[in-house]
Image: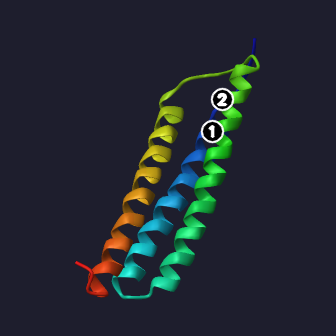
Amino acid sequence: MEKFDTEVIAMNLIANSGDARSLAFRALEQAKTGNYEEAEKLMEESNAASVKAHRIQTELLTSEAGGKVAEINVLLIHSQDHLMTSILAQELIKEIIILHKEKVNGKE
C-alpha cells in the first residue's frame, strides 16, 4: 500500500478550520452590534473556509479508501479536532445570531 505525508494535509485542515472558526466569531461580534448584514457576509466566508476543510478531509478519506494509507499522528488528530470544533462553533453561532435578532426585534 502506498503511503503519503500527512503533515501538509493536517496543516491545511488546521488553517481552513481556524479561518472558519475565526470568521464565525467575527460574525457574532458584528451581530452583537446589530450589523446583521456584515454578520451574514462573515458567516458565508466562514462556510467557504469550512467547505475547503471538508474537501481536504474528503480527499484524505477517499485516498485511504483507494489504498493510499495516511500515517496517523498527533498532528492529524489535532487537525480533526480543529475541524470538529470549528463546525460546532459555526452551528452554535448561527443559532446565537438568530436568538440575538429575535431579542432585538422583540420576539423573546
Quick check: 37 above or below 85? below
Horizontally, residue 100 falls left or right of residue 47, namely left
Assign the N terminus to one quadrant of the image: top right
Q: Residue at x 42, y 65 (%)?
A: 94
Give the quarter of the image for residue 7: top right
Vertical comparison of 69 with 106: above or below: above
**Which residue is labeled 1 in the image?**
57
Helix, strand or loop for disc 2:
helix
Residue furthest to the top in view is 1
Per the rendering, the mark at residue 61 is: 2
Q: Amino acid at mark 2?
A: Leu
Q: Residue 18: image x %, image y %?
A: 51, 56
Determine the residue positioned at 38% across, 88% down.
34
- Describe the element under mark 1 as helix, strand or loop: helix
- Front-most of 29 and 99? 99
Which residue is farthest front?
107
Crowd tier of the residue under label 1, counting other residues whose Cα lies within 10 Å: few below 14, some 14–19, many 20 or above = some
Residue 97 place in picture, x, y as percent: 38, 73
Q: Position of residue 43 (x, y in %)?
A: 52, 69
Number of marks drawn: 2
Observer able to see residue 38: yes
- List x then y, in percent, for residue 67: 75, 16
> For this rendering, which residue is in front, 9 or 62?
62
Label 1 near label 2: C-beta < 8 Å? yes
